[in-house]
Image (cartoon, rainbow, N blue to C red):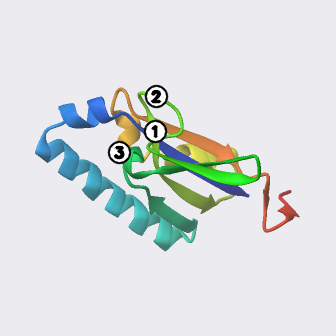
């Protein structure tokens, strides 16, 4: 079964962390990634740039209209994700709880099963 673990960040929360706390988060992600590689459960992981560097594309009257910045005004934004292949939802939740962000008030870690990939419905 495939699961997407998405990391929802709040800039105000991150800004309030000390340099040591931020370093610990990065080191924790490094250990988490290595453990997933060893277990064979990691498919992919990506971190995303700040939403201020995003472009929003909408098609209006057949023409693309591009605006800068985040799609929605929000305190939180998608900061990155892990795509995993593991045996169950319970295992995905167990793994998500190991992500350093899960222990910080104001940050979110969401677990969602992949419904289909590459045109194939997941079982």
Q: Residue at x 60, y 43 (%)?
A: 111
Q: Position of residue 42 (x, y in %)?
A: 55, 66
Judge the density around disc 2: few (<14), some (14-19), many (≥20) Cα neighbours within 10 Å: few
- In the image, taking residue 12 as reference, residue 19 lies left or right, namely left
Q: Residue at x 45, y 51 (%)?
A: 54
Residue nearest the viewer, comparing 51 with 6: 51
| Residue to which mark 1 is pinned | 77
State the image quarter where residue 18 is shown: top left
State the SS at label 1: strand
Q: Nearer the viewer, mark 3 or mark 1?
A: 1
Judge the density around disc 3: few (<14), some (14-19), many (≥20) Cα neighbours within 10 Å: some
Badge 2 or badge 3: first in the primary sequence: 2
Badge 3 or badge 1: first in the primary sequence: 1
State the SS at label 3: helix
State the image quarter where residue 69 is shown: top left
Note whether 86 is above or below 79 in the view shown.
below
Q: Position of residue 47 (x, y in %)?
A: 42, 58
Note whether 104 is above or below 94 in the view shown.
above
| Residue to which mark 2 is pinned | 74
Q: Nearer the viewer, mark 2 or mark 3?
A: 2
Q: Residue at x 53, y 46 (%)?
A: 6
Judge the density around disc 1: few (<14), some (14-19), many (≥20) Cα neighbours within 10 Å: many
| Residue to which mark 3 is pinned | 100
Q: Position of residue 101 (x, y in %)?
A: 37, 41
| Distance in Å between CA atoms under marks 2 and 3 | 22 Å
């Amino acid at each position: 079964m495939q699961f997407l673990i998405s990391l929802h960040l709040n800039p105000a929360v991150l800004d309030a962390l000390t340099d040591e706390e931020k370093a610990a988060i990065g080191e924790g992600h490094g250990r988490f990634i290595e453990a997933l590689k060893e277990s064979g459960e990691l498919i992919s992981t990506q971190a995303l740039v700040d939403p201020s560097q995003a472009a929003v594309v909408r098609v209006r009257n057949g023409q693309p209209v591009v605006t800068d910045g985040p799609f929605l005004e929000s305190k939180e934004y998608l900061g990155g994700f892990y795509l995993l292949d593991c045996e169950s939802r319970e295992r995905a939740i167990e793994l998500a709880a190991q992500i350093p962000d899960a222990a910080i008030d104001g940050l979110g870690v969401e677990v969602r099963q992949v419904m289909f990939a590459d045109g194939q419905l997941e079982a």
